[in-house]
Amino acid sequence: MPDRLGLYLFNLYFYTLFLLASFFVIPALTLFVAITRLFSSHRRTMKRFRRAISWYGMIVMALPFPFTRIRYEKGDGKNPDGPYIFICNHRSASDAFFLGVLPDEVVQIVNVWPFRIPVLGQYARFSGYLNIRMISPEEFSEKAVQLLNEGVSIAFFPEGTRSVTGKMGPFHGAAFRLALDSRAPLVPLCISGSEKIMPKGSLLLRPGTVVLRRLPAIIWAEYKDLTPFAFKNRVWDIIDRELAAMESSG
């Protein structure tokens, strides 16, 4: 009972701060972007707007500190100029917030439900987040390539849904077809621990540590001869091995 009571108190603390932070931070960031829009081009405004969304995500992630900690690791290896296509494993509804640690300007490819979240769903639309289920493959490819050409990185959760067991599901091929069409560097991003912070099917936050490990980019010369099927399986294997290594080392 004390453990259960402690969990409820922790969540009361977090969600109270979450509501307060959202009430003040979202209007403040909106006002900041609106004011700077008067002196900036549309492209620079969109960049600030997407960074503001990342700042909001980072603020939300910081609220439960020190009970919940986030660690971003960028390994050694090839680091070509972006933009990038990020490929992330998916274990928790909170994963989208954790991508706020990325220093890049990023648009996420999301499912239907994030667009239904009050306020945040509308902001996701404004910033150019894409739902591959709501548009045709041709329109998706056109919009995604345009974002990459503008210097905007794109983040995919190619499993399509959160894993219940922690074992990755098979990847869908859209991200890998986009890579082959655009020749953009593809960056595997391993997320470990988020399933313990907020397990699938629960809104209760739990103490713990989430690690995001950014692996070396896979450049065009390394994947240009692969089919989308072979490419997605290769990236699945890379992320699966890295997650196993991360979690075996504690």
Image: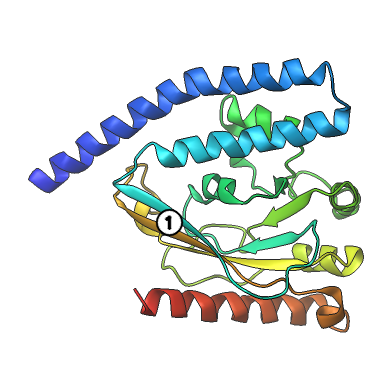
Which quadrant would the N terminus be assigned to in this image?
Answer: top left
Instruction: Tell me where residue 226 sits by quadrant.
Output: bottom right
Rendering coords of residue 162 (x, y %): 51, 58
Query: Residue at (74%, 15%) from the top-left corner?
Result: 35
Residue that carries the numbered disc 1 in the rendered image: 194
Above or below — where is 162 with respect to 116? below
Q: Nearer the viewer, residue 136 or 30?
A: 30
Secondary structure state at the residue bearing disc 1: helix
Above or below — where is 133 with respect to 244? above
Query: Residue at (64%, 47%) from the top-left corner?
Result: 111
Q: Nearer the viewer, residue 159 or 184?
A: 184
Query: Residue at (76%, 82%) from the top-left corner?
Result: 230
Rendering coords of residue 97 (x, y %): 53, 44
Q: Nearer the viewer, residue 79 or 87?
A: 79
Q: Nearer the viewer, residue 76 or 109?
A: 76
Q: Amino acid at mark 1?
A: Ser
Observer able to see residue 172: no
Which quadrant would the C terminus be assigned to in this image?
Answer: bottom left
Left or right of 242: which side holds 128?
right
Observer able to see residue 218: yes
Rendering coords of residue 101 (x, y %): 56, 49
Instruction: Tell me where residue 65 sits by quadrant.
Output: top left
